Every structure is written in C-alpha cells, then in structure tokens.
Amino acid sequence: MPACDILPRGLRRAQAAAYLGISPSHFDKQRQAGAIPAPRQLFGVELYDRHDLDLLFDGKAMVACNDNYWDKACARSG
C-alpha cells in the first residue's frame, strides 16, 4: 500500500475539520463550545485523534472531564 493511501490517525486542525466535513472556522467555534474533543499533544504538535472524531460523528464523543485529557475522559451520551 503506498504511503499516500494511509489515513493518519492524528489530524491537524484543518484536516480534522475536513474529516468532519465542516470548515476550519466552524470547527474552531464548536471546539470552543466544547462540542469537539480537545487535541492531544504529540511530539510538540496538536493532533486530533481520528477515532475521537469518529465517536463524535457517531454521537458517542469522549469529552475531557478536566483540563488534562490524558488523565480523565468520560463518555457523553448521544
């Protein structure tokens, strides 16, 4: 499989917005409203987990219960 055919799990902001089918500015508004899970820091880069975005799209998103995403997340019913 050529590398260009691999969909990365970690998506940057514009990629994450496109993955959900919305504009980056609308993505930002929804992120600020808490409707989109926080990005993860990986290697100094903010990345949105494609699996979290899939859960969001399915109405089963994980939302941070506190400021530290890695410490605790709870399922939001959809």
Image (tube, helix red, strand yellow):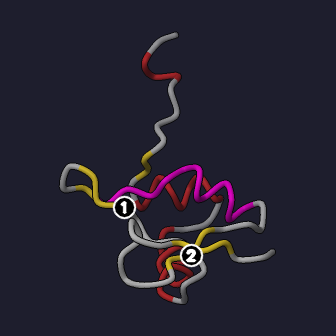
x 49%, y 53%: residue: 49
Q: Position of residue 60 (x, y in %)?
A: 74, 66
- Dot 2: what SS? strand
Residue 63 location, quadrant = bottom right
Q: Residues within 10 Å of mark 1 (few under 14, many from 20)?
A: some
Give amino acid for label 1.
Arg
* Magenta segment includes 68: no
Say which residue label 1 marks. Answer: 40
Q: Amino acid at mark 2?
A: Val
Left/right placement of residue 42 relative to residue 59 reads: left
User: Which of 46 and 70 lies nearest the eye of the viewer?
Assistant: 70
Look at the numbered disc 1 and give the secondary structure of its residue.
strand
Q: Is residue 5 left or right of residue 14?
A: right
Q: Position of residue 51 (x, y in %)?
A: 59, 50
Q: Name which residue lies at 56% across and 55% down.
A: 18
Is residue 35 or residue 60 the one in the foreground? Answer: 60
Q: Residue at the location (48% across, 69% down)?
A: 24
Find disc 2 in the rendering and name its residue: 63
Magenta residues, as a range?
Answer: 46-57
Q: Main secondary structure of the magenta part?
A: helix
